[in-house]
Image: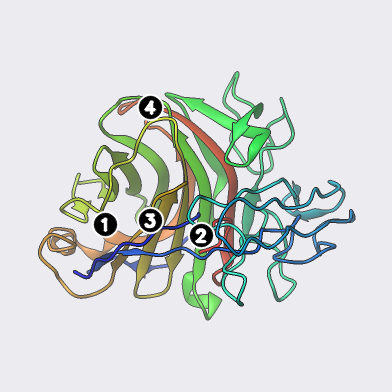
Amino acid sequence: MRRHSALLACIVLTSCVVGTFSIRDEPGAGGTGATGAAAGSGASGASAGSSSGGSANPTGGTSQGGQVNQAGSATLGGEAMGGEPTLPEGGAGMGGDGNGGPQAVAACAMDETGMPPIFCEDFDKIGIINTQKWEQVPGITPETGNGPHGSTGLMHLDNNRLKAKPPTNLDVAAAGGGTTVSFWAKTASSDTLVMWADFGTATNPDVRLVEDQKGLYWRSVQSIQAPSKSSGPGVTQNDWYCVSIYLTASTMTVSYFKSGAAVTSFVVDGDKTAGEDDQWLNQGSELRTIATFIGIGADPVQPGDLYFDDLRIAHGKSNVCGL
């Protein structure tokens, strides 16, 4: 296991085998603020509106992105949204490092090659659930609230989850360069084990991304966890976290952070490592090989009070976190 920390200012799958991983803290990228919809650009390829770019912040402090007119549809009815991202303290995360580093992109924005995401949701249609994307839950629709970048539309799931319709095939093997699932989430409950996102395998058992006071974990249908020991700093209540999951045919990298803290990452590959994936690899491949994105929110059996914003699933490494 390799671990280091540094200050930072910052689910789907095709047969991606979850195996060994190393856990490490990485510095995020800081500097230039994220722009309206496309990474670092003025007019977004997914929006018919104009956008003003964020101002550079060489000290790693707060940087504001431009507003984007909500005009064009990017994919599955999702709108490319601008918003006003704020850099986490320490000069990392949203907006890249100002020196060619990763740029955070809007949930439904085109990637750098001009391709739309596989699946996206910015939750900006208040009071309306997109039934082309989601199974409708009575009484559950996007609402206005204080999101990761200020007042915005977001999804509040109190002891509920939102399931994709149908489950989204991440098609990692066909991507040629991996697939990334990214989103913002906040827990408002003190429950000790809460599901944040749900994935499926070829035989349908759940592979869940869960949180407790010790961090984020993968948890299988057999209740086996990876890492088998703490993945890093605990997840705290009422703080927004950005999560980026990069998947290839043989590895899975989970990175997450909250404002003012270091990025925590753990990598799952094919090597059994004590305290990491030693228990995970004892399962059959049909129980630990991810194939689809199922949804977000808490399992009613393991309740939790969660908020979500800006979900993006895209081939390559583009993500809403700037990681």
In the image: residue 238, left or right of residue 193 = right
Label ID, residue 92:
2
Viewer-nearest residue: 218 or 33: 33
Measure the alpha-carbon separation of dots 3 and 1.
31 Å
Picture quarter containing residue 322? bottom right
Name, please, the residue furthest toward the bottom.
Answer: 176
- Badge 3 density bin: few <14, some 14–19, many ≥20, Cα 10 Å: many
In the image: residue 176, left or right of residue 152 = left
The amino acid type, in three-letter code, at marker 1 is Leu
Measure the alpha-carbon separation of dots 1 and 4.
24 Å
The amino acid type, in three-letter code, at marker 2 is Ala
Q: Secondary structure at mark 3?
A: loop
- Badge 2 density bin: few <14, some 14–19, many ≥20, Cα 10 Å: many
In the image: residue 124, left or right of residue 170 = right
Label ID, residue 304:
4
Of callouts 1 and 4, the N-terminal one? 1
Q: Is residue 178 visible?
A: yes
In the image: residue 295, left or right of residue 41 = left
Q: Is residue 206 above or below residue 91?
A: above
Which quadrant of the rendered structure holds the N terminus? bottom left
Q: Give the residue number, with chain letter if any, for mark 3.
A: 262
Measure the alpha-carbon separation of dots 2 and 1.
36 Å
Asked if the residue under mark 4 is in contact with the one under mark 2, i.e. CB atoms within 8 Å, the reply is: no
Q: Is residue 115 above or below residue 261?
A: below
Measure the alpha-carbon separation of dots 2 and 4.
29 Å
- Residue drawn at x 23%, y 75% is 270
Q: Nearer the viewer, mark 3 or mark 1?
A: 3
Of callouts 2 and 1, the N-terminal one? 2
Q: Give the residue number, with chain letter if any, for mark 1.
A: 287
Viewer-nearest residue: 178 or 191: 191
Q: Is residue 11 visible?
A: no
Q: Secondary structure at mark 2?
A: loop
